[in-house]
C-alpha cells in the first residue's frame, strides 16, 4: 500500500512549524482533543521510519558519492600537513 494515499492526521499537520520541525506541545494538545487520531499518527510515524530506513539503505548501497563519482567526498591528502625542514645550522 502506498503511504502517499493515506490521509495525515490533523494533529500531525497542526504540529508542523514553518521550518518543518514538530511542535511537540501542539501535537500532544491535538491528540488530547482527538484521541481517535492516535492510531493514524502511529501509522504515519511507522511509515516515516520505513521511508527513512529505505533512504539510509540506498545511501549505503550507492556509497559516498551517491553513485556519481564527481560527488564523492574529497579524500584526505596522504602527505603530512606540516613540512619539516632539516636544521642546517645557519641563521638567516
Image (cartoon, rainbow, N blue to C red):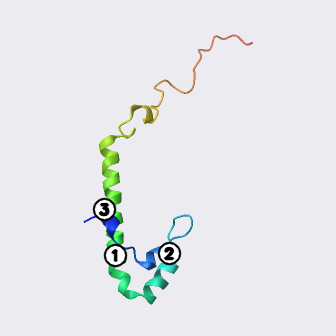
The vertical placement of 71 against 16, above or below, is above
The numbered disc on residue 90 is: none
What is the C-alpha distance between the residues marked 1 and 2? 14 Å
Please tell me which of labels 3 and 2 falls first in the chain.
2
The vertical placement of 5 against 64, above or below, is below
Residue depicted at 44% across the width and 36% down the height: 71
Locate residue 83 relative to residue 3 in the image: left or right: right
Image marks 3 and 1: residues in contact by CB distance under 8 Å: no
What is the C-alpha distance between the residues marked 3 and 1? 12 Å
Q: Position of residue 83 (x, y in %)?
A: 57, 21
What is the C-alpha distance between the residues marked 3 and 2? 21 Å
Q: Quadrant of the C terminus?
A: top right
Secondary structure type for disc 3: helix
Image quadrant of residue 45? Answer: bottom left
Q: Of residues 6 and 17, which is closer to you in this image?
A: 6
Q: Position of residue 60 (x, y in %)?
A: 32, 45
Q: Position of residue 84 (x, y in %)?
A: 57, 20
Task: Report the residue marked by disc 1.
Answer: 42
Image marks 1 and 2: residues in contact by CB distance under 8 Å: no
Residue depicted at 73% across the width and 13% down the height: 91
Task: Report the residue marked by disc 2.
Answer: 15
Image quadrant of residue 40? Answer: bottom left
Task: Report the residue marked by disc 3.
Answer: 50
Please tell me which of labels 3 and 1 falls first in the chain.
1
The vertical placement of 51 against 76, above or below, is below
Secondary structure type for disc 2: helix
Q: Of residues 70 and 88, which is closer to you in this image?
A: 70
Q: Residue furthest right?
A: 92
- Give the class, few, some or many, for how many residues have Cα within 10 Å of label 3's Cα (few <14, many ≥20): few
Q: Residue furthest bottom?
A: 33
Residue depicted at 49% across the width and 23% down the height: 79
Amino acid at each position: 500500500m502506498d503511504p502517499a494515499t493515506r490521509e495525515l492526521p490533523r494533529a500531525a499537520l497542526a504540529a508542523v512549524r514553518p521550518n518543518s520541525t514538530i511542535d511537540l506541545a501542539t501535537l500532544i494538545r491535538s491528540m488530547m482533543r482527538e484521541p481517535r487520531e492516535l492510531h493514524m499518527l502511529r501509522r504515519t510515524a511507522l511509515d516515516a521510519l520505513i521511508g527513512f530506513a529505505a533512504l539510509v539503505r540506498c545511501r549505503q548501497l550507492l556509497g559516498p558519492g551517491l553513485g556519481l563519482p564527481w560527488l564523492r567526498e574529497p579524500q584526505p591528502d596522504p602527505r603530512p600537513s606540516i613540512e619539516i625542514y632539516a636544521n642546517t645550522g645557519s641563521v638567516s
